[in-house]
Image (tube, grey):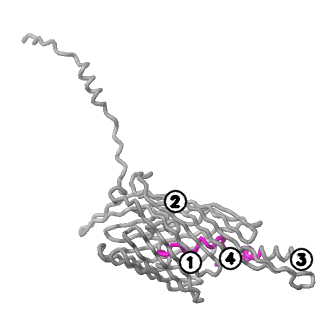
Amino acid sequence: MTRTLLAGLLLLPLAGRSRAAGPGTTAVPVLQVPMSARAAGMGTSFTAVASDASALFYNPAGLARLNAHEVDFSFAAGQGETSIQNFAYAGPTPFTGVSGNGYTSVGADLLYSQSGTIEVNRLDASGALASSERLNAGSDLVLSGGYAERVALTPLELPSASYRIDHYAGVAGKYVRSTIVNQTGSAFAADAGYLVHSPEAGLSVGAAALNFGGKIKYSEEREPLPATFRGGLAWQGGVPAAHAVIASVDGDYVVDEREWHANMGFEYFWVRTYGVRLGYQLHREDAGLTAGFGLRWKGRYLLDYAWGLGKTLSDQHRVTFAYRFGGVTPLERGRRRRPYIESVPEREQLRGIEDRRPRSSGVTPPKR
């Protein structure tokens, strides 16, 4: 009886997830937890905004917008006994890219979470408590890597103004290892994203497909990852030297859970140093207001904080520390591949041809 009860307790979470579509249908819920404090403060309305190392979470195409190398560390609090840590790197490369349009970047991410402990009670034949034991409830490990570049550059000429439209595309792959009590599963998944940005108009449009292709097998059945489609629109404006404003709207759809969510976000920075953020999330179990702030010191040291308020008044906090280095100018980032020119004879070869020409004898032929 003891073994049967323990087995039932271990399989209960899996059985509950596999019944029907809806929240909790998919495995590894940490893949849906926003880690970046900047994105969380904006209500996760970040698909068209992505321009830092957290782009791997929202839209891998956004990696191409980085003009410096960035390393960051994020952690989440207010999740009960659950602890979540995230390490990320992203930065530009000197290559012109597959399409030859420059703005190439790479990124990598390591996410680790622990779900605290659970208490397992064993009963004897009479129904009395025989023993009690606390076990590790589970943990998740996610390793990600991505690449992005500018795939096209479209000029748009209007009677009153001219605009440049940059098209960015990015792909990413991830390895997921998840443990629930004493059951462990692993899977691979892929992400893809596209982002269109016009610097003159300050408008961006983004779309992404995340966590596709993998299922985790804990016991006899395979559990799907939270495959998600995201889309968003953002506007950026202000006086660059003193004010910078970003406003965005965003939406996502979790395929297996058949759940959609909507997000709105706002960010304001003064003299590129002090920033505040607001966001609102709709159609979520813990939907509601989000807020945060950001500090930038010398353009290198970054601190971001975000706070979210769920319907149960359970505060959720995100903190991100980042360091930027090795800045690259937009001119270098936008360096495009030179057109192919067929080779021509070297100067030495031309000289050889000159040397092989028949020389004049110096005798003028007689005139007729």
Q: Are marks 1 and 3 in contact (CB under 8 Å)?
A: no
- Quick one: label 1 or label 4, which is nearer the N terminus? 4
- Residue corresponding to mark 4: 116
- Quick one: label 1 or label 3, which is nearer the N terminus? 3
Secondary structure, mark 3, is: loop
- Quick one: label 3 or label 4, which is nearer the N terminus? 3
- Distance between the Cα atoms at labels 1 and 3? 43 Å
Q: Is residue 224 left or right of residue 42?
A: right
Residue 32 is inside the magenta segment: yes
Q: Is residue 177 left or right of residue 67?
A: right
Name the residue located 45 percent from the left edge and 69 percent from the top edge: 50
Q: Are marks 1 and 4 in contact (CB under 8 Å)?
A: no
Specify the amino acid type for callout 3: Met
Image quadrant holding the C terminus, namely top left
Specify the amino acid type for callout 1: Trp
Specify the amino acid type for callout 4: Gly
- Between label 3 and label 4, give the one nearer the viewer: 4
Badge 4: how crowded within 10 Å, few (<14), some, or many (20+)?
some
Q: Position of residue 193 (x, y in %)?
A: 49, 64
Q: Looking at the image, which is closer to me, 255 or 26?
A: 26
- Residue corresponding to mark 1: 260
- Residue corresponding to mark 2: 146
Name the residue located 24 percent from the left edge and 68 percent from the top edge: 159
- Between label 4 and label 2, give the one nearer the viewer: 4
- Quick one: label 2 or label 3, which is nearer the N terminus? 3
